[in-house]
Image (cartoon, rainbow, N blue to C red):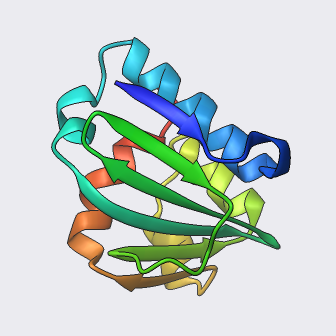
Amino acid sequence: MEVIVENPETINLLGLILKMIIERNLKQGMMEELVKNTRGNLRLGAGPMKATLKFEGERVVIARDWLVPARAKVAASLDTFLGIGLGKNPFVPFFMGKISLGGNLLWLLKLMPVFQVK
């Protein structure tokens, strides 16, 4: 299982943070089966930074591209993303209008633990 950054010379901070968290979770034996069995793109926007996670079975590709078709998308401030990644309840900011969601929300909920710092 590998996490690859597409065009690392142009990736933003969001992409680097995601790479670090996903690799850490995978190295600790967490989420490997979930990630391995997942296919599709997830678009993430944190303030002005955007990234797409491409789940391709044995690898996750992180790209700065925001225009690819995606199964789900999430947009919020970087502060909100960091809070959720550190274990805060994601439903509170959602109901406060601080998170914008789209696409297959059940798929997104299934993937949420992959991005949380344990």
Q: Is residue 8 above or below residue 33?
A: below
Quadrant for residue 33, please give it. top left
Kindly identify the residue that appears in the image at 56 percent across and 45 percent down.
Answer: 85
Is 48 on the left or on the right of 41, as rendered?
right
Q: Which quarter of the rendering shows the N terminus?
A: top left
Kindly identify the residue that appears in the image at 49 percent across and 32 percent down.
Answer: 3
Is 67 on the left or on the right of 69, as rendered?
right
Which of 84 and 35 lies nearest the eye of the viewer? 35
Quadrant for residue 49, please give it. bottom right
Image location (x, y in percent) of residue 86: 58, 39
Quadrant for residue 9, please give it. top right
Image location (x, y in percent) of residue 78: 75, 60
Which of 36 and 74 lies nearest the eye of the viewer? 36
Kindly identify the residue that appears in the image at 43 percent across and 69 percent down.
Answer: 91
Q: Is residue 47 above or below residue 117?
A: below
Which of 113 and 44 lies nearest the eye of the viewer? 44
Q: Is residue 107 above or below residue 29?
A: below
Image location (x, y in percent) of residue 50: 70, 67
Q: In the orientation shown, which residue stands out farthest toward the front?
A: 7
Kindly identify the residue that appears in the image at 71 percent across and 47 percent down.
Answer: 7
Q: Is residue 4 above or below residue 80?
A: above
